[in-house]
Amino acid sequence: MSWRRRLSDLETVVGFVPTMGALHEGHLSLVYQALEQNEVVVVSIFVNPTQFNNLDDLETYPRTLEADVTLLQTLSTDRIVVFAPTAHDLYDGTPKSKSWDFGSVSRVMEGAFRTGHFDGVGTVLQLLFEAVNPMKSYFGEKDYQQLQIVKQLTAQLGQNNEIIGCSIYREPSGLAMSSRNQRLTDVQKSQAPLIYRVLTFIKDHISSMSWSDLVLWAEEQFESDLGWRLEYLTLADAHSLESKDHYVETEPLRVFIAVHLGCVRLIDNLDLN
Ligand code: AMP
């Protein structure tokens, strides 16, 4: 890519924000941080087929490239490069996952419920990192498990690419912003903040209630409201992601959730310390 070579010739400090598009304020919070810390920011927009374990999810994933570019143009016209490759170009043929070993971090939660997901994530990020060659790359804690895996990926690739985690950007209701929120009906949008209410209740009561009682309480909340299916609710070590069955104040712990609302799958997580 000649634009990338030109930036290298100018010794420009390049930051990178990989996305799947349908951009919202959550993505923009990463872009703002990257603009503060780099001369040029590359934003990739690519719905990566190899990380979807569910064909329906891939086909219905919102694609709004024109609106995304217009939105980015409102931030900075000359310091943002949009990189929106076709699948064929990026993969140099038919998209196919490599197999990665990210250890136990990749086998729980998203790794357990979305077979092959992190192989797809590792594969596309290797290709994107090679194309963009960033000094710093920005990932949201919204996908906290992915963030831990990307740190491992860059270590395995031996790249000089600092991985920076960015906090979760939420709607005023507490709902974590997500491209998939666009697929919710108005009624579902009014139900969806339940996820954050459950997470904050857990944070507020984790030292006074047992984890098993909190899980029972959470299951009841989702059962009493229509259209929900809880996939997992996990208390885990914030670094190893090893699941825990009780709270210890001195340990770095997080709570993670994946839940279906109608046919939309939503994830969120919260720091408990
Ligand atoms: P996606 O387009 O969903 O693959 O997300 C691209 C990047 O934006 C990932 O690093 C996500 O973790 C991050 N991201 C998505 N939603 C949010 C949010 N609400 N707050 C912070 N980061 C987010």
Image (cartoon, rainbow, N blue to C red):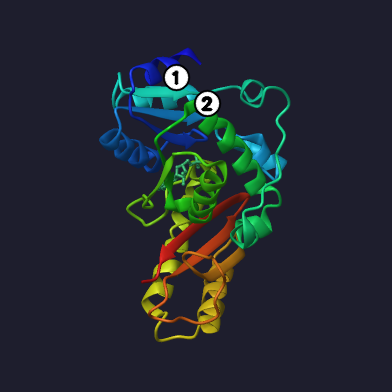
Residue 224 is situated, as x and y percent measured from the top left of the image, at 55, 70
Residue assigned mark 2:
131
Check if mark 2's residue and mark 1's residue have beta carbons within 8 Å.
yes
Viewer-side residue, 200 vs 113: 113
Determine whether 135 is above or below 93 in the image.
below
Q: Which of pointers 2 and 1 lies earlier in the amino acid sequence? A: 1
Q: Total number of numbered labels? A: 2
Determine whether 169 is above or below 199 in the image.
above
Q: Amino acid at mark 2?
A: Ala
- Residue 273 visible, this angle: yes
**Of helix, strand and loop, which one carries label 2?**
helix
Residue 198 is situated, as x and y percent measured from the top left of the image, at 45, 68
Relative to 156, 165 lies left or right: left
- Which residue is located at x 48 percent, y 57 percent? 268
Relative to 29, 44 lies left or right: right
Q: Amino acid at mark 1?
A: Arg
- Which residue is located at x 65 percent, y 60 percent? 107
**Of helix, strand and loop, which one carries label 1?**
helix
- Which residue is located at x 70 percent, y 30 percent? 95
Seen as rendered, the residue at the extreme front is 158
Cα separation between marks 2 and 1: 8 Å
Residue 251 is situated, as x and y percent measured from the top left of the image, at 42, 76
Residue assigned mark 1:
4
Viewer-side residue, 21 vs 245: 245
Question: Which image quarter has ligand 1?
Answer: top left
* Disc ID at residue 108: none
Determine whether 138 is above or below 214 in the image.
above
Query: Which image quadrant is residue 99 in?
Result: top right
